Structure formats: structure tokens, C-alpha cells
Image (cartoon, coloured by chain):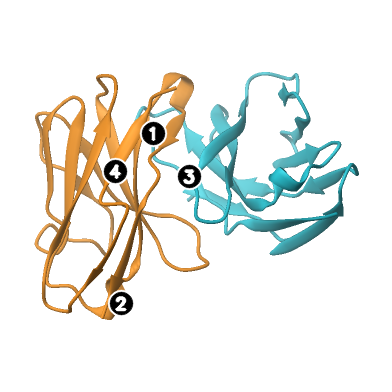
Amino acid sequence: AQTVTQSQPEMSVQEAETVTLSCTYDTSESDYYLFWYKQPPSRQMILVIRQEAYKQQNATENRFSVNFQKAAKSFSLKISDSQLGDAAMYFCAYTGTSGTYKYIFGTGTRLKVLA
Amino acid sequence: SAVISQKPSRDICQRGTSLTIQCQVDSQVTMMFWYRQQPGQSLTLIATANQGSEATYESGFVIDKFPISRPNLTFSTLTVSNMSPEDSSIYLCSVEGRGQTQYFGPGTRLLVL
């Protein structure tokens, strides 16, 4: 069975600095998708970034980028130039390519941004 | 990405009663999903609701407790039946997007007294 592990319950970063959130997963599948979602306090869960396992290139979205290490089954999120609005819970998620779209979520990392 | 709305956004209910949560999406989608997020926790999938078929429930969730309707490609409801304080959670719906991506609604915050 697939699992997703986020080993950092909470992280802090100074405004304008860079922070990396960790995510590891376990799967026997060779093709799959990985995601980072952001859930601000009392607000909607939104997609931050998406990675397709068959793509070697790491995904980037503006200040957000991933370090995808397929062999190590690692999928970390780097946030550059952190802003106060980045404060949120961040969830790592995995889904296979079976067509069910079922996600496996990690337990989340709470990111605090210090002014 | 899809625009998803949920009603109600929050509610306070008495134990033993039922609440129906609505999820509306601005485009036609085949798959809709219902999740529960207990305070400070991650998301747990309750069921997958495909239009034209019975919902598929995950282990630990049953239709009698969480009946789901999916009358068309843009709408679904989740009912939380015979509520107890343990049902106090955020309930979220989501829909499929391109490339196995899910897009989430704003959630319904439920408090059961």
C-alpha cells in the first residue's frame, strides 16, 4: 500500500527567506503524480504544485519549486522569498495512474512566517 | 481549474439530527469526492461519487451514516446522519481536473453539540 510521510509537523521561516518542506512516499508503482496543497487557516485548500513521476524535470510555480528524487521517493517543496501569506498547512499528496483519482495525503506541515 | 461552492459554510447541530451538505461545481465533472478533516488532522476520503452510479465508500464509512447523492455532473450532496459530537469536522468536496489533479471546495465546518 502507498504511504505518504511528512516528518515536520511545524516549520518556521523569516519573511523573505527560503524554507523547504519534506515529503517522502512509498509505492511500488512506476508512474504516479505528486502534489503539494496549501490550506490557509479557515480557508480553502488550493493546489500549489504538481509533479508527474515520469518527468525528470522538477516542477516550478513562481516562488514554489520541488526537489523530486524518484529513486529516494522524496518530494520536497521549496518556498523562496517567503511571504506572510504563505503561512498555512501544507499537505503532500500522492495518486497513482489507475484512473480512480484517489489521493493519499500526508499529515501536513504547519508553516509559520515570521515578520 | 474548477470553481466549487459548498453550502452551508458552517453549521451547529444538535446530536441525533442530520445535515445535508451541498457541493456545486461550475463545469461538468465525472468524479466528485467527499472528505472529512477532523480538527488539526489531514484529510480522510469518505467516498467517491460518480454520476450515474452508487457512491463508493472507503473503509470505515457506510452509506447509512453518510448517504450521498449525485443527480447530475455539476452537483452532489453528502448527508451526515444521526450526528454525534464525534462528527464535528470540516467536510470538503473535491472534483477531478486534468492530470489526476483534484480541486477542492471551501469546506463545511460542522459542530455537533
Marks 1 and 4: in contact by CB < 8 Å?
no
Looking at the colours in the rendered structure, which chain would you say is drawn in cyan?
A
Dot in front, 1 or 3: 3
Q: How far apart are marks 3 and 4 (CA)?
A: 11 Å
Where the C terminus of chain A falls, by quadrant?
bottom right
SS for callout 4: strand
Q: Is A47 drawn above or below residue A52 in the view shown? A: below
Q: Residue B6 carries which label?
A: 4
Give coordinates of residue B26: x percent, y percent.
Answer: 29, 23
Q: How far apart are marks 2 and 3 (CA)?
A: 23 Å
Q: How far apart are marks 4 and 1 (CA)?
A: 21 Å
How many other residues sit within 10 Å of disc 2, few (<14), some (14-19) or many (≥20)? few
Dot in front, 4 or 1: 4
Looking at the colours in the rendered structure, which chain would you say is drawn in orange?
B
> As shown in the figure, which amino acid type bears the numbered disc 3?
Gln
| Residue at x 71%, y 33% (from the top left corner) | A70
Q: Is A111 drawn above or below residue B112 in the view shown? A: above
The answer to which of B29 and B61 lies nearer the viewer is B29
Give coordinates of residue A72: x percent, y percent.
Answer: 76, 41
Q: How far apart are marks 2 and 1 (CA)?
A: 28 Å
SS for callout 2: helix
